[in-house]
Amino acid sequence: KIGMIAENLGYNVYAVGGFVRDLLLRQENLDIDLVVEGDGITLAKKLQKEINAHIHTYQKFGTAVVILPDGFRLDIATARTEYYEFPGALPKVEMSSLKLDLYRRDFTINALAIKLNPKQFGLLLDFFGAQRDLKERMIRVLYNLSFVEDPTRILRAVRFEQRFGFRISKQTLDLIRQALKLNLLFQTTGSRIWHELKCIFGETNPAAIIERLNELSVLKSLHPALKWDKSLKKLFKEIEAVLSWFELLFLEEKYVKEEVYLLGLLDPLKEEEVNSFLTVLEFPKSKKELFFKKRREIFNIYGLWQKKREIKPSLVYLTIKEIPLEFVLYLMAKLSPAKKKWLSLYFTQWRDIKPILTGDDLKAMGLKPGPIFRTILEELLKARLDGKVKTEEDEKKLVKKI
Ligand code: ATP
């Protein structure tokens, strides 16, 4: 249908990038990127009219996001012919606008296109040997200056390599090494690096990617204090286990997985080192300060709990309840199995416990509402958590004592 609509406008339209790659690898991918030879925004507007899609357009870039009536999302980009300025191009290149668009991409395997116009529907366009690289399981850049043009591709190369179990080609590895030698990684913005790090932490096996980044000396180029060793490997394993446990139990509860892994990666760093790294990543000041405050709290709790053999449920409850979930999960990953149990009980039981008596009951008992209510209810909760009260009568007795 989209092909037909484009055809009627006199445009060519192609599915490109990760979607095509994953189709050939027989992996699911629900994000479809389209490239239009024509005007992407006009096509998006036509789709809005003809199939009742929702659209957001970005005039400046000639791009649009289209949400189809069934919720499916399409990203539409316009292939323009004036894209010669990239450094890898020869001075006089003659390419179709699609080919130019694909040439600007990161790796051969992401530079495939499938035509969607009705007459040639399904035609696979492979200008750069992507099918060969998919067969040979290779990550290869499209031109030698690729990493100079965009150093975040170094992180992307390793991410795709580990995700698919591919190898980065020898020449591409040499180009990565050269780029690192020239210290190019931060020629780009810190927020783009953070974006790629988040993508890494969002993968199924971030540990393998970080390990490989370390092996290629990318990690220490990101920050000299970053390293990968046995204990970090163990921590990442623990984080993975804690996160899958948590997801199984609490499907509806949202947390930012990437932040838990970030905490993991920064675990061995001193505070000044964390500070300088987060500054490099362009974390806003307020976010950075909150991060420190909570990280410090976690380190304190960890230190205290290391010394304890047992703990009252009410203490776990009061210590943890104001701490963001990501930090609690990170703490859980750090703790020994016996102490992990404290937090698993907190999640599965303790945090849902409430006293039987409510504020209304206190009023009915003749107490005057005021700040004291909070104190009483908190004491009741503590007593209940620690098993000191069982029945409503027990609670009433305790109220009288307080
Ligand atoms: P994923 O499965 O992780 O979503 P993807 O290949 O779809 O993988 P995206 O980050 O969504 O990755 O990017 C979509 C497409 O845009 C890629 O396939 C690639 O062709 C291109 N692309 C993304 N980032 C870059 C970059 N830094 N340099 C060049 N091309 C890029």
Image: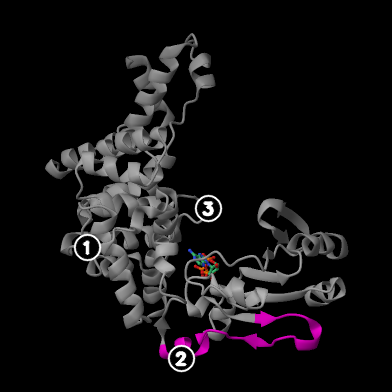
Task: Answer left or right for 244 relative to 32.
Answer: left
> Which comes before the other along the chain, label 3 or label 1?
1
> Residue tagged by mark 3?
252
Which residue: 16% across, 64% down? 230
> Residue tagged by mark 2?
135
Q: How many marks?
A: 3
Residue 55 position within the rendered picture, expressed as x and y whole percent measured from the top left: 75, 56
Which residue: 72% across, 60% down? 67
Q: Residues within 10 Å of mark 2 (few under 14, many from 20)?
A: few
Q: How is the image coloured?
A: one colour
* The residue positioned farthest toward the front in the image shown: 91
Residue 105 position within the rendered picture, expressed as x and y whole percent measured from the top left: 52, 70
Task: Answer left or right for 225 relative to 59.
Answer: left
Q: Is residue 70 magenta?
A: no
Q: Residues within 10 Å of mark 3 (few under 14, many from 20)?
A: few
- Residue 267 or residue 131, whichever sits in front: 131
* On-image quarter of the N terminus: bottom right
Write down the region rendered in magenta: 114-136
Kind of residue at disc 3: Glu
Q: Is residue 325 above or below residue 371?
A: below
> Which comes before the other along the chain, label 3 or label 2?
2
Disc 3 from disc 1: Cα separation:
28 Å
Disc 3 from disc 2: Cα separation:
40 Å
Q: Is residue 205 above or below residue 4?
A: above
Q: Is residue 29 visible?
A: no
Which residue: 38% across, 76% down? 161
Residue 18 position within the rendered picture, expressed as x and y whole percent measured from the top left: 55, 73
State which quadrant residue 21 falls in: bottom right
- Residue 391 or residue 81, whichever sits in front: 81
Q: Secondary structure at mark 2?
A: helix
Which mark is drawn over residue 234? 1
